[in-house]
Image (cartoon, rainbow, N blue to C red):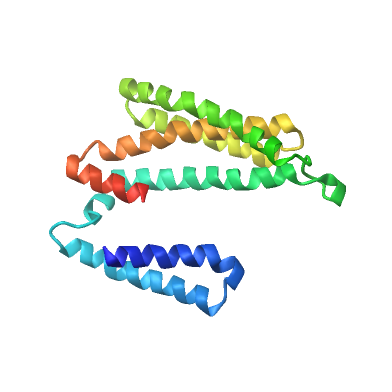
Amino acid sequence: MALAVRDRLTFLLALSEGRHWGWGSGRTLGLLLFAGVALAVWIPVELRVDQPLVDMRVLAGRTVALANATGFLAGFALFSAFVLVPRFVETSRSVGLDYGFGSSATQAGLFLLPGALLGLLSGPLAGRLGDRFGFRFPLALGMVVTAVGLVLLAEWHDRTWQVVLGMTLAGGGCRSASGRWRSSSSTPFGRARRASRAGSTQS
């Protein structure tokens, strides 16, 4: 437990302070190195103990590994859009840039609202599709819709409706996929192992 806490605390501290200290500074690199060493020590410890905090054998399974990789990619893409899109739409063209709409913070939030609302519908709908056709179908469908939305954002963003459309598809698709990859990776295991897998994913 102590190793896991040290690993995550040092890693998160390096990420949060790296831009202030400098990514090549001794403090940042030292914290990242310490986090890597702590992780390398923690994994063998978890494999040896009778009741591990995280069951590494579960995470190494093909189903769980693929589901976690899918979730990581979808989450990284969507949260990157959540960070970049408000900055993009709030940028004013009056400063000499050829992009942006000069939106206020409130207006920037409205660009993200349709995707969040669609996610409220696509999540439950994906659950019903998963019950009927299996969880792979809504997972794949959600990832495809997310990818289409992000491609639209990357290629067409000159007008407000284009940004709204891209974020709506990305938000709804990612929400559809997120619940399904958790379900698909938890189904093959007993209660204890499902708890271990879910805990490692959420943390």
Figure label count: 0
Q: Position of residue 45 (x, y in %)?
A: 21, 66
Q: Is residue 49 above or below residue 179?
A: below
- Residue nearer the viewer, 70 or 82: 82
Horizontal arrangement in the rendering, residue 158 relative to residue 56 (left or right): right
* Residue shown at 60% from the left, 66% from the top: 19
Q: Can residue 22 be seen in this snapshot?
A: no
* Residue shown at 57% from the left, 75% from the top: 24
Q: Position of residue 7 (x, y in %)?
A: 36, 66
Q: Is residue 10 above or below residue 151?
A: below
Horizontal arrangement in the rendering, residue 38 relative to residue 122 (left or right): left
Q: Residue furthest bottom?
A: 26
Q: Quadrant of the N terminus?
A: bottom left
Q: Is residue 4 above or below residue 78?
A: below
Q: Residue furthest front?
A: 106
Q: Position of residue 153 (x, y in %)?
A: 65, 38
Q: Residue furthest left?
A: 50
Residue 20 picture quarter: bottom right
- Residue nearer the viewer, 86 or 187: 86
- Residue nearer the viewer, 47 or 124: 124
- Residue nearer the viewer, 149 or 88: 88
Q: Can residue 48 be seen in this snapshot?
A: yes
* Residue shown at 66% from the left, 31% from the top: 164
* Residue shown at 82% from the left, 50% from the top: 97
Q: Position of residue 103 (x, y in %)?
A: 75, 39
